[in-house]
Image: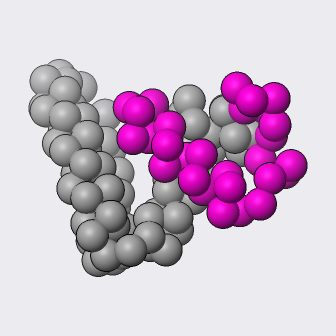
Amino acid sequence: MSASGRGAASGSDDTVGDRVVTLRTAGESYAVIAKDIGVGRSMEAFDLFVATVAKRPARERAKLRADENRRLDAIEKRNAKLTDMAQRTRREASLKKLRARLIAIA
């Protein structure tokens, strides 16, 4: 259920996607966004983010991608401090996949 009292099923895909972009732009994590829009996994929220950004005009799309890359850079810096190398490697692989998805919506 979202803060407005609506789950993902009660709004159109465009409305839910807009909500995802709004929340992510405000700095919310995909886990928080997933819970807000009523989907099970953070990757589903990321998928909605990518799909929505892809529909935006080129200038806005470029800004949203640049902003998201800055957020991913911050995550990457935090990740570099991890001492558990297996966890660090998994997170690096995940970040690489996220970045590839962002590049694909150029």
x and y percentages locating residue 75 in the rendered image: 24, 35
Instruction: Report if residue 88 is visible in the image.
Output: no
Residue under the point 50% across and 37% down: 23
Image quadrant where one finds the C terminus: bottom left
x and y percentages locating residue 24 in the rendered image: 44, 40
Residue under the point 67% across and 52% down: 16
The quadrant holding residue 29 is top left
Residue 56 vertical placement versus 8 (above, below): below
Q: Is residue 65 left or right of residue 15?
A: left
Q: Is residue 17 left or right of residue 98?
A: right
The quadrant holding residue 100 is bottom left
Task: Please provide the residue range marked out in magenta.
Answer: 1-28
Q: Is residue 21 magenta?
A: yes
Residue 33 vertical placement versus 106 (above, below): above
x and y percentages locating residue 66 in the rendered image: 21, 56
Residue 97 vertical placement versus 91 (above, below): below
Q: Is residue 10 left or right of residue 98?
A: right
Q: Given the current orientation, which residue lies at the most extreme right position?
A: 10
Q: Nearer the viewer, residue 32 or 98?
A: 32
| Colouring | one colour
Residue 76 vertical placement versus 51 (above, below): above
x and y percentages locating residue 87 in the rendered image: 31, 34
Residue under the point 39% across and 41% down: 25
